[in-house]
């Protein structure tokens, strides 16, 4: 009797009863029919033919003729070999390698003496400034930093090991060097374990740095030392440069990111010249390269010379795409980049939530009369709530995909927390365009994840009338205002779009040029009454057509179509769970492109940079899962 009762209440039994109901069965058949039509019809064929088109390009007359001539082998290989020998044997790299080896073999006691001397003389310099010049406020950050340096110096002085041995014995350093940077363990194991002296030199260097603290904060000096170490790590491992850029993007200034991507590109090219990395192009890369040329062209052919600077910044950031697709070629590096993106996004989101709940949100980005219940909108490390939302909706799908793929309970807990924090921060940006883009992106993601998503969606539509009883009034009101011209933000955008449409009709051939410097003077001639000034068109596609001409917009849309083809090809043919990462990247880009209908998402340089990095990451994931990446040469 008990067995019968348990059998009738088992989860499998209840699931069968639920799935056999008329409503659910009908919805399941409808969703299955729709999915079959999409995957097997004209749409499915068009979006899954990337490999055929890429093969056609590789077998084209131009490519075939270049292979037949073997230009790279006959003409450039001797020069490449000579360049490789020159680089490998150069005095500069030889000096750097020798200095690094000496530093790694130096005793931890020497580093402790340097740190102690640095902290001691920095303290004396600080006291001198306080008593001689008179300090209005006590610098508690400096005092705490000096105390920490003194404590660390005592611990280092008591060690007899070399720096290399200390790094090998530390779990934190092993994780960073081997798991994050990707350095081989043998590199450190080959260095002697007993540390060398040079105590006098260490003490004198500490004095020099201590005296320098009169002009520069000690923490900045330490950061400069860490920066030099980071530059060397990127030199020997350009992939780490890509990872560092992805992690630092939400926090670093624009020109620092420009310098970082150019330096990483330089290190990558040195590796290529030495034969330790390679450059590979396929159809999608060619399309991106064409748009890259048009972007550079938009800085030269412009109504204002001020277009040159933003065009150069855009081109520098577009190099990030090519760095990602050519350097991130293994599953390990793909996962490192994804974890780095999620980690940075979580920090940004937590800071945004802190702003919201501690009254630090900004109240200048919404109509206060229409949305009186909204006290403010969070911006986190960005300058604008819409910009923050654009960043978030590109990363959140990756959080969700990693949560689904990961099997470890602790990792699932962390990823679930990251996804919830990011979604919560997105809510408090109060960006309606981002909300709609996010909903669209996640809907497509779950449709790609499971065939029963459409069934759940159709069934869930029955609960739409009950949403006002569940969601807060402020969110309902914000959603309901979409398209309402009484909202000053909506009316502002519509009037700008009308003026920009007239501008495009007159400048459709070459565009006005890239950036605000070319947009503003022309816009003032077409602006409607009451909207005489505007920084951009508040629409990505109108802005591209206006800056680069209609050709630029056509190339951009064609590039996106080819990129979508490459992703859908993988999704159709790949059965591994990692294909969800490709789907997540696709849906993140789709979400931000949907927001681009109501905002110019590239107005912020960092969002523009993140767009191309994520675009490249999607291509890297596809190449990795296609098993075309060869073992790296280190």
Image (tube, helix red, strand yellow):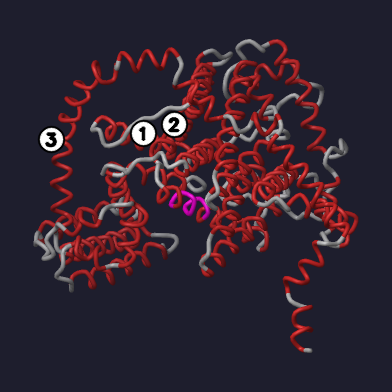
* Number of residues whose C-alpha sits closer than 10 Å to that of mark 2, classed few (under 14), some (14–19) or many (20 or more): many
* Number of residues whose C-alpha sits closer than 10 Å to that of mark 1, classed few (under 14), some (14–19) or many (20 or more): many
Looking at the rendered image, the disc whose residue lies closer to the viewer, 1 or 3, is 1
* Residue pictured at 72% horizontal, 70% vertical: 12
Q: Is residue 445 above or below residue 495?
A: below
Q: Is residue 391 above or below residue 462?
A: above
Mark 1, secondary structure of its residue: helix
Mark 2, secondary structure of its residue: helix
Mark 3, secondary structure of its residue: helix
Is label 1 in contact with label 2 (beta carbons under 8 Å)?
Answer: yes
Give the image location of residue 281, x and y in percent.
42, 27
Q: Quadrant of the C terminus?
A: top left
Residue 340 painted magenta: yes
Dividing the picture into quadrants, the one containing residue 272 is top left
Give the image location of residue 364, x and y in percent.
72, 45
Residue 68 painted magenta: no
Q: Which residues are magenta?
A: 336-342
Q: Is residue 328 above or below residue 269?
A: below
Label 3 sits on residue = 91
Of callouts 1 and 2, the N-terminal one: 1
Looking at the rendered image, the disc whose residue lies closer to the viewer, 2 or 3, is 2
Q: Quadrant of the N terminus?
A: bottom right
Of callouts 1 and 3, the N-terminal one: 3
Rounded to the nearest angstrom, the CA distance separating label 1 from label 3 is 22 Å
Q: Horizontal placement of 60 versus 22: left or right?
A: left
Label 1 sits on residue = 265
Rounded to the nearest angstrom, the CA distance separating label 2 from label 3 is 29 Å
- Residue 319 is tagged as 2
Dividing the picture into quadrants, the one containing residue 466 is bottom right
Q: Is residue 26 visible?
A: yes
- Residue 115 is tagged as none
């Amino acid at each position: 009797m008990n067995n019968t009762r348990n059998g009738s209440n088992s989860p499998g039994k209840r699931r069968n009863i639920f799935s056999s109901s008329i409503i659910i069965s009908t919805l399941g058949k409808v969703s299955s029919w729709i999915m079959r039509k999409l995957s097997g019809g004209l749409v499915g064929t068009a979006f899954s033919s990337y490999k055929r088109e890429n093969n056609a390009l590789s077998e084209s007359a131009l490519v075939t003729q270049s292979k037949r001539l073997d230009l790279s082998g006959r003409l450039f290989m001797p020069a490449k070999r000579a360049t490789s020998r020159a680089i490998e044997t150069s005095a500069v790299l030889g000096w750097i390698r020798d200095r690094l080896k000496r530093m790694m073999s130096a005793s931890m006691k020497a580093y402790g003496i340097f740190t102690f001397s640095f902290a001691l003389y920095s303290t004396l310099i600080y006291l001198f400034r306080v008593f001689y010049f008179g300090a209005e406020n006590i610098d508690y950050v400096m005092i705490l930093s000096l105390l920490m340096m003194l404590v660390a110096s005592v611990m280092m002085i008591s060690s007899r090991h070399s720096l290399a041995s200390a790094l090998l014995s530390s779990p934190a350093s092993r994780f960073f060097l081997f798991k994050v940077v990707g350095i081989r363990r043998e590199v450190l194991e080959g260095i002697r374990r007993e540390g060398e002296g040079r105590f006098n030199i260490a003490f004198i260097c500490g004095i020099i740095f201590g005296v320098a603290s009169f002009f520069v904060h000690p923490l900045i000096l330490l950061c400069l030392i860490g920066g030099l170490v980071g530059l060397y790590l990127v030199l020997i491992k350009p992939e780490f440069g890509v990872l560092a850029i992805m992690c630092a993007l939400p926090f670093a200034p624009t020109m620092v990111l420009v310098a970082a991507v150019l330096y990483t590109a330089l290190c990558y090219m040195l590796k290529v010249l030495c034969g330790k990395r390679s450059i590979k192009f396929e159809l999608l890369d060619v399309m991106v390269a064409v748009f890259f040329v048009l972007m550079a062209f938009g800085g030269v052919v412009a109504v204002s010379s001020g277009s040159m600077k933003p065009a150069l910044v855009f081109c520098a950031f577009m190099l990030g795409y090519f760095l990602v697709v050519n350097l991130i070629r293994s599953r390990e590096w793909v996962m490192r980049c994804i974890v780095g993106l999620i980690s940075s996004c979580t920090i940004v989101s937590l800071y945004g939530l802190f702003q919201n709940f501690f009254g630090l949100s900004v109240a200048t980005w919404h109509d206060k009369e229409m949305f009186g219940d909204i006290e403010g909108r969070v911006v986190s490390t960005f300058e604008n709530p819409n910009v923050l939302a654009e960043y978030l909706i590109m990363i959140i799908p990756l959080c969700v995909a990693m949560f689904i793929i990961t099997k470890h309970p602790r990792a699932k807990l962390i990823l679930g927390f990251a996804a919830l924090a990011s979604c919560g921060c997105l809510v408090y940006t109060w960006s309606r365009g981002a909300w709609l883009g996010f909903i669209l992106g996640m809907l497509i993601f779950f449709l790609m994840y499971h065939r029963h998503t459409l069934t759940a969606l159709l069934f869930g539509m029955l609960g739409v009338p009950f949403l006002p009883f569940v969601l807060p009034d402020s969110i309902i009101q914000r959603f309901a205002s979409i398209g309402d011209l009484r909202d000053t933000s909506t009316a502002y955008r519509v009037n700008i779009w009308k003026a920009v449409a007239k501008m495009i009709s007159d400048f459709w051939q070459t565009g006005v040029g890239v950036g605000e410097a070319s947009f503003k003077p022309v816009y003032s001639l077409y602006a409607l009454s009451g909207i005489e000034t505007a920084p951009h068109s508040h629409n990505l596609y109108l802005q591209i057509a206006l800056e680069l001409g209609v050709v630029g917009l056509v190339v951009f849309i064609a590039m996106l179509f080819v990129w979508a083809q490459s992703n859908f090809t993988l999704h159709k043919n790949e059965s591994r769970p990692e294909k969800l990462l490709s789907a997540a990247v696709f849906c993140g880009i789709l979400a931000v492109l949907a927001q681009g209908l109501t905002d110019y998402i590239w107005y912020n340089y960092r969002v523009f940079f993140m767009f191309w990095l994520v675009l490249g990451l999607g291509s890297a994931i596809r190449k990795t899962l296609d098993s075309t990446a060869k073992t790296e040469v280190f």
